[in-house]
Image (cartoon, rainbow, N blue to C red):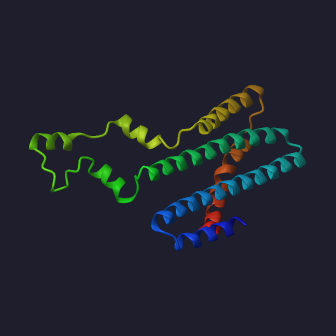
Amino acid sequence: MENRELIRENGECEQSEPDIQKTCVEKNEKLKQKNIFLDLIKILIAVDVGVVVFCYLEQNNIWLVNTQIAFFSTALIIIGSFIGYSNSVRRNLENGNVGEDILKKYEDPYNMDDEEDKIDEKNLEKLKNKKLKWYEILLFSFKGGFNFIRILGYAFLIAGFIWLIKKGLFDTLSFLFGVSIVPAVSLISILLLKKKYY
């Protein structure tokens, strides 16, 4: 049913005016991203249930505790990253920071290449020598990735790690297995889901 909605909206977009078509395409992309995100969560839950069942059948509580703490914290980190970066991309699209415009903004921020604008020599030298400071670059790079869910995931990972060590339950192999499940499953799932939706 979800794919039918996507096809129907695409059909309506092709026959409408350019402004309506643009809005329709944006809604269509949001719907695709939402469907990919929900499918990814379903797959992660299914894989986690499989890990829990395996640990239960093996009666290995240490593996169960280690994999679950690592799994949930890593899942929060990846979900937070996904949400943060998708919000960042959406804000850039809404502000018109796409394509050649954004490249021009960073390659030629003061429009020095425009022949129409006359800039005196003193201002030209100042503008050429001005560069972004290290903290501006850092802030620009990480703006999309920081959100509450991601920070909560890192806090949960560190707190869980410390708790496991204090209780004497920490097992390196099972913890690393729990941490590696989410990125591996996410990567494979997104590659497969992109084929489904695109």
The residue sitting at 48% across, 48% down in the picture is: 91
| 67 relative to 89 in the view: left or right | right
Task: State the residue lying farthest toward the left.
Answer: 121
Q: Is residue 105 left or right of residue 70?
A: left
- The front one of 184 and 80 is 80
Rendered location of residue 140, percent (x, y): 41, 41
Where residue 154 appears, as percent x and y from the top left, is: 62, 36
- Name the residue located 32 percent from the left edge and 36 percent from the top edge: 133
Q: Residue at x 23, y 39 (%)?
A: 130
Q: Is residue 171 above or below residue 95?
A: above
Does the rendering let one see residue 195?
A: no
Residue found at the very far top of the displayed protein: 166
79 and 118: which one is in front?
A: 118
Q: Residue furthest front?
A: 17
The image quarter in which residue 188 lies: bottom right
Question: Front-most of 53 and 121?
Answer: 121
> How far from the left and from the top, in percent, is residue 112?
19, 51
| Location of residue 164 in the rendering, given as x and y in whole percent from the top left corner | 74, 31
Q: Residue at x 60, y 35 (%)?
A: 148
For the C terminus, give its image quadrant.
bottom right
The N terminus is located in which quarter?
bottom right
Residue 170 image-quadrant placement: top right
In the picture provided, is 79 more to the left or to the right than 173? Answer: left
- Up-down relation of residue 169 to residue 29 (above or below): above
Total numbered circles: 0
Q: Is residue 171 visible?
A: yes
Q: Going by the image, does 17 lie left or right of 135?
A: right
